Amino acid sequence: MADTDDTTEPGDMDGMDDSPVMYVQPSVSGAAKILVVGPMGVGKTTLIGTVSEITPLSTEATMSRAGARLDTVVSPSKTTTTVALDFGRITLGGELVLYLFGTPGQQRFLPAWKDLARGALGALALVDTRDLEASFDAIGHLEDLDVPFSVAVNSFPDSALHNEEDLRSALDLLPHTPLVICDAREHKSSVQALISLVSHLIETVAEAP
Ligand SMILES: Nc1nc2c(ncn2[C@@H]2O[C@H](COP(=O)(O)OP(=O)(O)OP(=O)(O)O)[C@@H](O)[C@H]2O)c(=O)[nH]1
Ligand SMILES: [Mg+2]
């Protein structure tokens, strides 16, 4: 996404690394920390990898195929899971840099969220309509931590079609919470989901007393 002409420099600060480093564009005037959350296998790592203008950091580890969601919903081709965090960066409109932090999807990592959420301006909550209940914990946790969020349904080939009203009701979303459909593998679609979140955050700030 970024124009690499002005921003790419050799990463030779220590004389060890010749890989290009993507510096933040000079036009950037603001930055925000954003969480990408959701249940295991919903596509958090995929989305961050799709949109990131820097090589994303991921902390994948091989997982055993134990667990109800794994056996019934998540593709057998998924063999790893995030164990600490994902990290990526995207510049929107040349002015705003989003630092994206993906949380681990497994339940047992939920306590780590508190640290990851520190300083986050907002969150994109990914939802898998094949297993809506699996998203309740992530959304509930955002509410507990008071992190504003928008919801993006990541569609899979076997996802049933639901109308927006039913989804909102099933997820118990407030009327002002944005709900969009995305494909975490598609750049444009994933960026649109992030833009819906940023627009929501701007509105939330504007409406704050
Ligand atoms: N069909 C389809 N497959 C997807 C989509 N997004 C992700 N996948 C696939 O689904 C699998 C899960 O993606 P991940 O990005 O690892 O999921 P995650 O949310 O990071 O999972 P955890 O880190 O284990 O919580 C991968 O094999 C992706 O290729 C999508 O939009 N459509
Ligand atoms: Mg992951």
Image: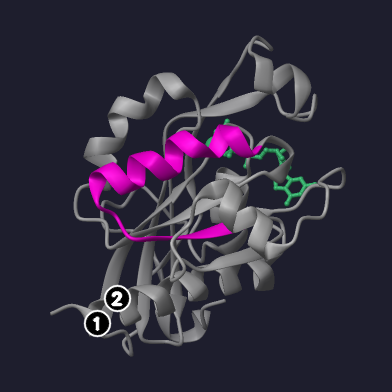
| Image: magenta residue range | 132-152
The residue positioned farthest toward the right in the image shown? 158
Q: Is residue 110 visible?
A: yes
Q: Position of residue 117 (x, y in %)?
A: 27, 46
Q: Compared to 180, does 110 lie above or below?
A: above
Q: Is residue 24 visible?
A: no
Q: Position of residue 163 (x, y in %)?
A: 74, 61
CA separation in Å, label 1 and label 2: 5 Å
Indicate the amino acid at tag 2: Thr
Q: Is residue 138 magenta?
A: yes
Mark 2 is surrounded, within 10 Å at the Cα level, by few (under 14), some (14 to 19) or many (20 or more) other residues, namely few
Which residue is at the front of the view, 13 or 147? 147
Which residue is at the front of the view, 60 or 140? 140
Q: Is mark 1 within 8 Å of ligand 1?
A: no
The residue positioned farthest toward the bottom in the image shown? 27
Q: Position of residue 203 (x, y in %)?
A: 33, 81
